[in-house]
Image: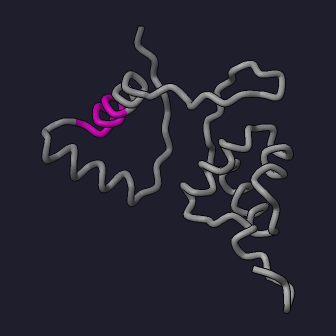
């Protein structure tokens, strides 16, 4: 089956694709089709995480979820609290946070003067 799709690209992206297409003596739509097809065929399955009921489910990070993790982490929320709010597992949030290069909020917790170390 062949499907036609209309894609609107920013001018700079289209011009960059045109240069690549010219080098390979092909057309922009052929480059896009090849890349999309390759990406889908070679896609890795999402990582498995466990829900509270213990059933395995798949959780894929999305830019929106990663943005929420960064925002909530910046507010000092723990990975467990973020996981509960987003409906994902705590290990998933920890992995996303580390992938974003963020440290756990407990790392930044200030110690009270005179508190034991």
**Of 65 and 73, the residue lying toward us:** 73
- Determine which quarter of the picture holds residue 67: bottom right
Magenta-drawn stretch contains 7: no
Which SS does the magenta portion mostly show?
helix
Percent x, y for residue 38? 34, 28
Q: Residue at x 57, y 57 (%)?
A: 98
Q: Residue at x 81, y 81 (%)?
A: 116
Percent x, y for residue 81? 84, 51
- Determine which quarter of the picture holds residue 40: top left
Part of the protein shown in magenta: 27-35
Which colour assignment does the render follow?
A: one colour
**12 above or below 75?**
above
Name the side, left or right, on which 92 lies relative to 2.
right
**110 above or below 32?**
below
**Of 3 and 57, the residue lying toward us:** 57
Q: Residue at x 75, y 68 (%)?
A: 106
The C terminus, quarter of image: bottom right
Q: Residue at x 43, y 28 (%)?
A: 43
Name the side, left or right, on which 31 lies relative to 10.
left
């Amino acid at each position: 089956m062949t499907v036609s799709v209309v894609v609107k690209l920013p001018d700079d992206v289209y011009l960059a694709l045109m240069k690549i297409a010219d080098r390979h003596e092909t057309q922009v739509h052929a480059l896009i089709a090849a890349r999309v097809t390759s990406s889908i065929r070679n896609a890795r399955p999402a990582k498995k995480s466990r829900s509270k009921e213990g059933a395995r489910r798949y959780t894929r990070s999305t830019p929106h979820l990663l943005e929420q993790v960064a925002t909530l982490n910046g507010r000092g929320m723990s990975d467990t609290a973020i996981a509960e709010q987003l409906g994902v597992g705590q290990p998933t949030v920890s992995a996303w946070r580390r992938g974003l290069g963020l440290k756990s909020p407990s790392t930044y917790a200030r110690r009270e003067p005179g508190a034991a170390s």
